[in-house]
Amino acid sequence: MLSQIHTGAAQQSIPVRVDRWLSVQQMSGKVTYQDQQQSRSAKVGDRLQAIGDGITTGQRSAATLEVDTAVGFITLAENTQINVQMLSIAPDNGRITHLSVPYGQVRLRLRRFTHRGSRLQLQTPAGVSAVRGTEFGVAVQPNGKTGLATLTGAVDTTAQGQTVAVPAGFQNFTIPGEPPTPPVPLRDNTEIRYTLERLIQRGLRQVRFWGQVDPVNTVLVGNVPQVTDRNGWFSIMLPAVSVQKLQVTVITPLGRQQTHQLTITL
């Protein structure tokens, strides 16, 4: 039975627990469902209903979740995890949805909310993104750095006590422990620039590969996620062979993806 809700000004901020869920609509590859009792292969129709329930995608895998009552859809790219933090209803019948994305890339397509109490909040290691109906995406790197891109509507990003609005056609990123960066025009750019640094360490020849992408993007070398700095730079060490093949995948917060097959000649 639902607890009694008192009238008055506080009514606008009291969530009511109800039967709500996210359901798996589509999936491909290796997708795992987990709740408090089990972890198993996901299947279409699975529901995330309780705090901690989640979906994880593996390499070359994807999943699409529907938020109940036609609120919208959430698409998970490969190597992504999403969990439920809260699913409730506000006193004005608005839907309150709090989710966490500890790593990976998700794209959300949400209809405009019709109740003032409705909100959707996405928690990453770097901060919180809150919306009231929009289309946007986030990309979370292994160290928690989070890139965000807004296609329609508007998103508020909050970290370290500061909130930055990211309107349609803009992007920004947040580094854990820092406030969000100011928004810049949306690029959705998967290009990569790179340079090589030849080194001799303890008598051994090595090569450091320096790559640069848009700072909001995530990068995988082979299948290994990389960490980029605030200017989008990352580096890896390569053996000093005359010719080397390198596969670098760049993923934008909106899910656009490009795999670069690089031939490194020394």
Image (tube, helix red, strand yellow):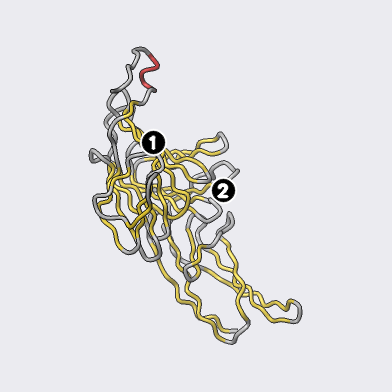
> Residue at point 31% right, 32% down?
95
Q: Which mark is residue 57?
A: none
Q: Which amino acid does label 2 sit on?
A: Ile
Residue 168 image point, x, y percent = 38, 45
SS of the residue at dot 2? loop
Dot 1: element: strand
Q: Earlier in the sequence, mark 1 or mark 2?
A: 1
Give the residue at the far bottom of this rendering: 242
Relative vertical location of residue 115 with respect to residue 24 in this rendering, above or below: above
Q: Nearer the viewer's eye, disc 1 or disc 2? A: 1
Residue 4 position in % (x across, y down): 32, 16
As measured in the structure, the alpha-carbon distance from the residue carrying label 1 to the one carrying label 2 is: 24 Å
The total number of labels drawn is 2
Residue at the spot of label 1 = 86
Considering depth in this image, is 250 or 34 the residue closer to the camera? 34
Among the 4 quarters of the image, the one containing residue 257: bottom left
Determine crowd level at label 1: few under 14, some 14-19, many 20+ residues with C-alpha closer than 10 A.
Answer: many
Give me the residue at 50% from left, 76% from top. Answer: 246
User: What residue appears at the point 30 percent right and 49 percent down from the top-left corner?
Assistant: 65
Q: In this view, does 48 lie above or below 235?
A: above
- Given residues 210 and 27, the one toward you in this image is 27
Kindly identify which residue carries mark 2.
175
Q: Nearer the viewer, residue 167 or 211?
A: 211
Q: Marks 2 and 1: in contact by CB < 8 Å?
A: no
- The quarter in which the N terminus is drawn is top left
* Residue 14, horizontal then vertical, whole percent: 38, 22
Looking at the rendering, in which quadrant would you find the C terminus? bottom right
Q: What residue type is labelled 1?
A: Met
Q: Position of residue 36 (x, y in %)?
A: 39, 44
Crowdedness near tag 2: few (<14), some (14–19) or many (≥20) residues, C-alpha within 10 Å: many
